[in-house]
Amino acid sequence: MSDIKIDTLDINILRALQGDARRPFQEIAAHCKVSTDTIKNRFNGMTKKGLIRGTTIVIDPKEVGQNRIVSIGIQVTNPFAEQILTLVKKIPGMLVVTRAVGRYDIEAVAILKDIEQISTIKNTIGDFQQVKNVDVEIWVDKPLLCPKNFEFEEVRP
Amino acid sequence: MNLDKIDTTILDMMKKDARTSLREIARVLRVSPDTVSNRVEKLIKQGIILSSTVVLDPSKIGYSFITRFGVNVKPAYATQVLEKIIKIPSVIIASKVIGNYDLVAISVVKNFQHLCTLRDTILEMPYVENVEQGMWINTMELCPHYFLI
């Protein structure tokens, strides 16, 4: 983990973009009382340093026919977690698949069409050898996404 | 909702880079920038595009891992607790769920001390009965489009 240095101006730029990534740099510049070029340079700088990975739009999955987000918790016989992880990653619809410490050895988040597909995937994972248990949490309502709240602190050398 | 090729191209391009200019999208689609602009407005109005945001690498600013909290609350109070949880500064996404838990929240975490504080904060909320956490190893992906397509 290598922290990069960010100052108040960087933080203000990030905050402005977290709410609306399409905000014109001129507008942010006016708000921060610096030039548009400064904003542009800071943005490119933070991208180059890897802090900014990109910008994206948030789409309501329901509107594009993907109705259900599920989180999946998998308990595995040791030491097969890594092997199962590779298999689970190959299942279509997986957004995040990761090793975990806690009740589960592997956790995943997937976005799926309907309950039938959820059931199919649960069975697929349950069928893998060395999988002891699969728990599924079905997300209901609109999930609240809050990258806006993501907290920053000035990182000093 | 019926989306045509213009809509899906707009969504695809803006998913990869929300700052793509409408002019650029228009060039790819061979339509006028006005058409693209109208479509984008429509997609926002219809609630298909919920918002846009900048995707950060949390490991660059002091966060070392992601934790998934599973929360059990007194029946009928899930919404109330959810609204409080989403206000915790490091929580990225939270939702009501059906399963072992009533709520799930995914949060970035600085260190073990921070994890304990987060856990206590949730536990101390009224109507919360139990909090369980799973710490994600080797995963520092924090891209909203992983969560919402």
Image (spheres, coloured by chain):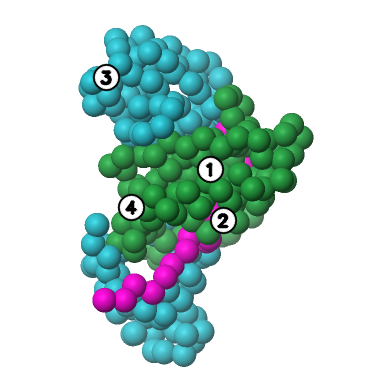
Chain colours: A cyan, B green
Between the residue at mark 1 and the residue at mark 4, the CA separation in whole angstroms equals 17 Å
Side (left or right) of B126 relative to B149: right
Check disc 2 and report its element: helix, strand or loop: loop
Displayed quadrant of residue A25: bottom left
Callout 3–callout 4 Cβ contact below 8 Å: no
The residue at 49%/56% (across/down) is B90
- Quadrant in which the N terminus of chain A appears: bottom left
Q: Amino acid at mark 4?
A: Ser
Q: Are marks 1 and 4 in contact (CB under 8 Å)?
A: no
In whole angstroms, how far apart are the C-alphas of marks 2 and 4? 17 Å
Q: Position of residue A41 (x, y in %)?
A: 29, 79
Question: Which one is earlier in the sequence, the residue at label 2 or at label 4?
Answer: 4
Tell me the distance, in whole angstroms, between the alpha carbons under discs 2 and 3. Answer: 35 Å
The residue identified by callout 4 is: B64
Residue at mark 3: A78
Q: Which residues fall within the magenta stretch? A: A139-157
Of labels 1 and 2, earlier in sequence is: 2
Does label 1 or label 4 sit earlier along the sequence?
4
Q: Which residue is mark 1?
A: B105
- Cα–Cα gap, marks 3 and 4: 25 Å
Tell me which chain the residue with mark 4 is part of. B
Q: Amino acid at mark 2?
A: Ile
Q: Compared to B63, does B105 lie above or below?
A: above
Question: In the image shown, does B98 or B111 lie closer to the viewer?
Answer: B111
In percent of width and height, residue A129 lies at 29, 10
